Amino acid sequence: MSEFEEIFKQLSKIAADRDLREALRRASKSYIEAYFNKTKRVENLRKVVRAIKEYSIAHLEELVKKTIEVMENKGINVYLAKTSEEAQKIFDEIVPNGSLVVKAKSLTSEEISLNEFLSRKDCEVVETDVGEFIVQHLGSRPMHITAPAIHVKREEVARLLEKITGEKIPADPQVLVGKIRSILRSKYLNADIGITGANVIDAETGSIFLIENEGNIRLVSSLPRVHVVLAGVEKIVPLLDDAFQVCKVIWRYAGYEMPSYISIISGLSKTGDIEKNVVVGAQGPKELHVVLLDNGRIGLSKDTVFKEALYCLRCGACMYLCPIYRVLAGYFGYRYMGGIGAIWTAYIAGGVDKAAPLIYLCTLCERCKEICPVNIDVPKMILRARQILARENKVPFEAFLTRKYIASMGAPYRR
Amino acid sequence: MIGLWTGCTARIRAPEVKESAESILSYLNIPFEEIDEDYCCGAPLEVLGFMNDFKENLSKVKKVLSSKKYNNIITLCPECLYVFKRYLPQTISRKILHISSYLAKYANALFKKTFSENNITVYYHEPCALSRKLQYDVTEEILEKIPGLKILGSSLKGKYSTCCGAGGGVFIYAPDIAIEAASEKIETEVIPSGAEYLIVSCPVCYMVFKYAIALKEYSIKLLYLTQFIQETIHSAGGGI
């Protein structure tokens, strides 16, 4: 099939890009050094969290229903979007045309093309995560789950900020971050809407867990008048305690002993300080909306093999250690990246045709499975996906040749 | 009698690997014969997703491997071994070994001769099928029997070892990407270790590293385990 050939050709060029490789190396090196230190003490917790995820995905519909009930009882506006179009429609109603929107990093928002959608409504959308800010202004795309600008060297960031500010800026991370901070300050204060994702949601108390180091999520979720949370339904776990366990594993595997901030948002901002009259929207947002996104997840949760993809905690550990990600970065992916991303691309965001070349780029080395905090068997899912693609003849041309050679000559190569 | 399951890559694309394995067996006076001249283990079919073809192929392979004639069957390719270990009944698969496991018991005999103290440094690249999937790789134990040899390298060992980039069929249909992945491993792990030799025990890893080294002109010397043993015995004045 020539589509494969074309894509592999483009990706070969990216694989040979020395700048990209150098940037990835700098980031992976420090991650890998930290990995074994930070994850040692949560070794047993992995099994617990795996069990929590297995249970949650097996009872997904029930947990979604419960979460919606609990949240509604607290006065939260909660929505279940079946598809990405439905999610966009919900945002259309919540966000007035021409709003200033500040956003925290969210892959789920990439999945529903939220920024593009809001831009069409004449909104100014400002990504506030430093990495996302860089990526947004470069017109590039996020290249890693927890480190979206992993592929950008500091020199490039300096050039970018010089263009934005018209000032001369040294390629010093301290100065670069300071500049971005000062650009963003006024945006937070003037924003109409703040949009975040969620790391975990518990169905017991309907609380939203947000893990971060920068502090932008706290600003995005508390300064604007309206806070909207967009989260895939697979983020839901049954109990408040489960959510803490999952969080602990996420930040350890993202490379941190403890993150700087954990926000737990469990209801509306309110006060009863004046004669016990409850006033909603005391100092935080006046409105809280939670958009739960299905977009294929509930269907996938019923597939005996692929349901495992929904256990993903998005810690990003697998990517740093993937032989293909090491040379292609986020180009080994569509909205979601790496081997696990290939499965998500096929069944959640992108579709089978976009996913096919990614599915065939995995080397099946199985290292991601060892590294993954919940031991997701990505190679098994990749193999299964290849079997399905092969049945539909959606395989690279050379694969057909290989099959032919083995049948006729007993070897995959011409002698 | 030993059955030698060379594996397609060593037989067709890297005959130097096959020849070196044969010389080591001859050197040890072990009678053997090649048994897979007309067969493929089927690993490419499995990884590409052609499961029906894979199963059909497996039944042919099973016949060859069931022969009572062989006390042991040795593979040069960990990928073949990985297929056999998972898909053949234990009565057959327990007789099948990777060449490293087979040679481990001869390591003392191989290196007892005239060794003066060497000063050799090697980086051993662990193949996924042995280090991670089967979790049994004794190659380093063999290498350690060589006097004066030092194994240098990565903190990422065993089940955390880095893939060469050629697995899963990628080397078949996206060789340029596989070669870049191999070069990334060489540049970030092998060269920084300071080792003189890059030793492999998988012909597929061997191929992708060979291309990467030729294209990028790295000065590291790449050898398959049996090539390295051969060279070591030879340089110690052993007649091989």
Image: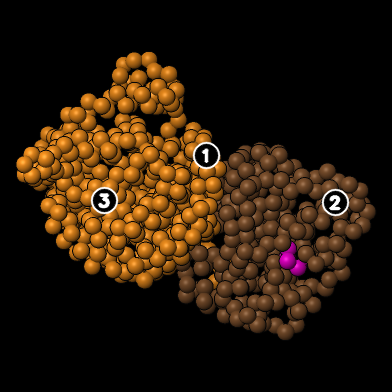
Q: Which residues are magenta?
A: B99-103
Q: Is residue B121 left or right of residue B58?
A: right
Which residue corresponds to the image point at 75% horizontal and 79% vertical from the top-left?
B70
Q: Are marks 2 and 1 on the same chain?
A: no
> Mark 1 or mark 3: which is in front?
3
| Residue denoted by label 2 | B147
* Residue type (three-letter) at the residue carrying disc 3: Ile
Which residue corresponds to the image point at 24% horizontal and 64% vertical from the top-left?
A63
Whether tag 3 and tag 2 are in contact, CB under 8 A, the answer is no
Residue A96 shows in the view: yes
User: Image quarter for residue B212?
Assistant: top right
The x, y position of residue B232, in whole percent, is 84, 52
Which residue corresponds to the image point at 70% horizontal and 77% vertical from the top-left?
B95
Task: Check residue A208 in the rendering and tell me which mark sits there, or answer none.
Answer: 3
Q: Is residue A363 left or right of residue B32?
A: left
Task: Tell me the element at label 2.
Answer: loop
Mark 3–mark 2 distance (CA, rounded to whole Å): 61 Å
| Residue denoted by label 1 | A30
Q: Chain of mark 1?
A: A
Q: Is residue A335 left or right of residue A290?
A: right
